[in-house]
Amino acid sequence: MSTIHVPNPTDPELAQRLVLDLLDPDLRGHALAELRKKREMFPDLAPLLWHSFGTIIVLLQEIIVVYPVLSPPTLSLLASSRVCNALALLQCVASHPETRSHFLKAHIPLYLCSFLENTSKTRPFEYLRLTSLGVIGALVKAEGTEVINFLLQYEFVPLCLHAMAVGSELSKTVATFIIEKIVLDDAGLGYICTTADRFFAVGTALAGMVTSMDDEPSPRLLKHIIHCYLRITDNPRGLEALQTCLPTTLIDGTFNNLTKDDPTMQQWLQELLVKVRSGKMGGLPPPVHGHMPRV
């Protein structure tokens, strides 16, 4: 009696075989899609991707090949899907503690800048924007200053602010989560509040999203926005500025329906209003509750 061998989807040999397939141009598209789909089944996929000969170069090639169609924006949905598969694997590398530092030292996030700078709101470009933000979001979930210092040094704050202005609700949420994690770090808070131009840019982006809540209410986005504002009040210059530029709709109860089912958001908003009205700073930054929005 013969039996048919069905591959175990969590079999390490399957992951190794798919990674090897990345080196074959004829098999690469399928391997990218399968690895993305199964990436959470392989806990050691990130080290495997990083240490396998030529694999990271292949993933970067998949990114670079679409640069010519970014401007003018002619990226197809099929091409966008393929490059997003490669980005998802880079996100896997960015999120793993064994490979995260190598990922930064190789300056791989810089390859995403062109995607985050784009202004197109079409589906292929929004998909690209959201997946790129997911890579940066995976980085900032790690505690420590290495990631924050990298993002500040290479001007990722303006890129996130741009995504907050032109992206979909989910892109805005992930971008605001990144800004939130940056300002919760002392270096990040100092960076944003050091100059009037930087504070104005961040304040404008946050206020713009608050205004957009009239048409597209989003409790999870509002929660990140409120937390950003609350953390900014821990800086004397930031607190002083917010006393004159905090959006009125955060003060007059406009968003009571969005905050009523979230005690943490209610608490943060109450603390924000008390500090802005009193002009007194608080103590340590409150922790981030929850997780990065799922990409």
Image (cartoon, grey):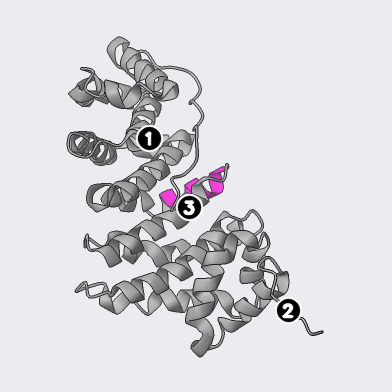
Q: How far is the residue under mark 3 from the one under mark 1?
A: 22 Å
Residue at 20% x, 17% y is: 252
**Of the residues under marks 1 and 2, which one precedes in the sequence?**
2
Distance of label 1 from label 2 (alpha carbons) = 48 Å
Tell me if residue 44 comes above or below residue 203 in the rendering.
below
Residue 224 bears which disc, if any?
1
Chief SS of the magenta region:
helix
Q: Amino acid at mark 3?
A: Phe
Question: Secondary structure beneath disc 2?
Answer: loop
Q: Which marked residue is nearer to the observer: mark 2 or mark 3?
A: 2
Residue furthest out toward the right: 1
Using residue 3 as the reference point, say whether residue 97 is left or right of it. left
Classed neighbour count for the residue bearing mark 3: other residues with Cα under 10 Å, few (<14), some (14–19), many (≥20): some
At mark 1, the secondary structure is helix
Residue 196 seen by the camera: no
Marks 3 and 1, the one that precedes in the sequence: 3
Residue 46 shows up from this direction: yes
In the rendered structure, which segment of residues is drawn in magenta? 144-152
The relative height of residue 42 versus residue 163 in the rendered view (above or below) is below
| Labels 1 and 2 touching (C-beta < 8 A) | no
Q: Amino acid at mark 1?
A: His
Name the residue tied to disc 2: 5
Kindly identify which numbered label has been placed on residue 150: 3
Front residue of this view, candidates 224 and 146: 224
Point out which mark residue 77 bears. Answer: none
| Crowding near the residue tagged with mark 2, few <14, some 14–19, many ≥20 C-alpha atoms within 10 Å | few
Kindly identify the residue that appears in the image at 56 percent across and 70 percent down: 35
| Residue drawn where x is 40% and y is 59% of the image | 131
- Relative to residue 281, is residue 74 depicted above or below? below
Q: Quadrant of residue 271?
A: top left
Outermost residue, front direction? 1
Name the image quarter holding residue 223. top left
